[in-house]
Image (spheres, rainbow, N blue to C red):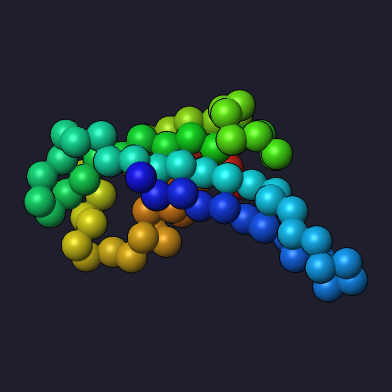
């Protein structure tokens, strides 16, 4: 599973606050060259309350960087 966390690091207090989290997992139905993935984003401050979910199918995992997978997943979840 891929876990993407976005943290805000305060330059004033040094406090670290998680402001977003996403999980992406391989659903096991792809092949060596192309993967199928499911994903979820969570409400701020929660690792269990799902905000949105989505899928990316036939992702060329050996050709593209993981950030491309994250971007596609966000797009498929209708983030603008």
> What residue sits 59% from the left and 35% below the top?
47
Image coords of residue 54 (percent x, y):
43, 33
Q: Residue furthest left?
A: 32
Q: Residue at x 42, y 61 (%)?
A: 67
Q: Furthest-top residue in view?
A: 49
Q: Is residue 17 left or right of residue 46?
A: right
Q: In percent of the image, x 75 and y 65: which residue is there?
A: 9
Q: Kindly give the residue lying farthest to the right in the view shown.
A: 12
Q: Residue 72's spot in the image, x, y percent? A: 41, 49
Q: Is residue 53 left or right of residue 80?
A: left
- The picture places residue 59, in percent across and down from the top left corner, at 25, 49
Q: Please state which of residues 39 and 2 is positioned toward the viewer in this rendering.
A: 2
Residue visible at 65% across and 34% down in the picture: 46
The quadrant of the rendering that contains the N terminus is: top left
Total number of numbered discs in the rendering? 0
The answer to whether 13 appears left or right of 3 in the picture is right
């Amino acid at each position: 599973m891929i876990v993407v966390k976005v943290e805000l690091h305060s330059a004033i207090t040094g406090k670290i606050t998680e402001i977003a989290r996403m999980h992406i997992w391989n659903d096991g139905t792809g092949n060596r060259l192309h993967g199928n993935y499911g994903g979820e984003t969570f409400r701020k401050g929660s690792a269990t309350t799902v905000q949105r979910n989505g899928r990316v199918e036939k992702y060329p995992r050996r050709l593209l960087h993981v950030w491309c997978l994250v971007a596609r997943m966000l797009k498929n979840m209708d983030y603008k």
